[in-house]
Amino acid sequence: MKIAILSDTHSRYHTVEKAVALLQQRNVNFVLHCGDIEDADTVWLFHGFTAHFVLGNCDVLEPLSIQQAVYGIGGELHRPYGRVEREGVQIAFVHGHDKKLMMEIEESGDFDFLFYGHTHKAEEHHTGPTRVINPGALHRADPKTFVLLDLPGGAVETVVVG
């Protein structure tokens, strides 16, 4: 099973459409979004995917419309962070602007993976048993990236969105 993890789309429809096309080409239909969506129209671009979202610091202006769009596409909005289990792998995802929350999740030892955004910089490290990964961003990043997680093995591939 492949899972796409992306973050910081910031209403950049053209870039999100390119990322969605790449996901469709690779037959990936499960998406985790680490926040800074900014508007409901961006959410609708993920229609047809099994999509999970968390809110970021830039989502405070339209949280209700974002929530309605998430429900409209059959997705799930997690608060204050997301938690999913697939193929026996425990995954958490958060935006990352709440440093206290992020550290609590990271240091809990409850997750195999923790994905986060906010910084617009791809990064990876380990804290105990948890592999902590920022997939990069689809706005204000060079290059614009997201990651694919291949389960159950745990291989992670960075995908550049041209």
Image (spheres, rainbow, N blue to C red):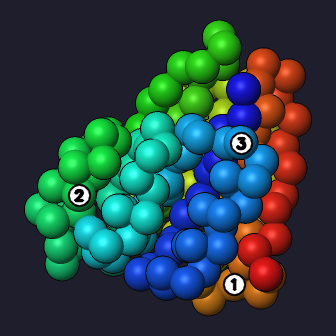
Q: Residue 45: x and y, percent?
A: 43, 64
Cα separation, mark 1 vs mark 2, equals 26 Å
SS for tag 3? loop
SS for tag 2? helix
In the depicted structure, whether residue 135 falls above or below residue 89:
below
For the residue carrying disc 2, how many other residues have a C-alpha within 10 Å: few (<14), some (14-19), or many (20+)?
many
Task: Say left or right for 42 vs 6.
Answer: left
Q: Amino acid at mark 1?
A: Ala
For the residue carrying disc 3, how many other residues have a C-alpha within 10 Å: few (<14), some (14-19), or many (20+)?
few
Cα separation, mark 1 vs mark 3, equals 25 Å
| Residue beneath disc 2 | 69
| Residue beneath disc 1 | 141
* Sequence-first disc among 1 and 3: 3
The residue lying at 55 percent from left, 45 percent from top is 31
Q: Amino acid at mark 2?
A: Ala
Q: Nearer the viewer, residue 70 or 62?
A: 70
Q: Residue 158: x and y, percent?
A: 83, 58
Cα separation, mark 2 vs mark 3, equals 23 Å
The residue lying at 75 percent from left, 54 percent from top is 25
* Sequence-first disc among 2 and 3: 3
Quadrant occupied by the C terminus? bottom right
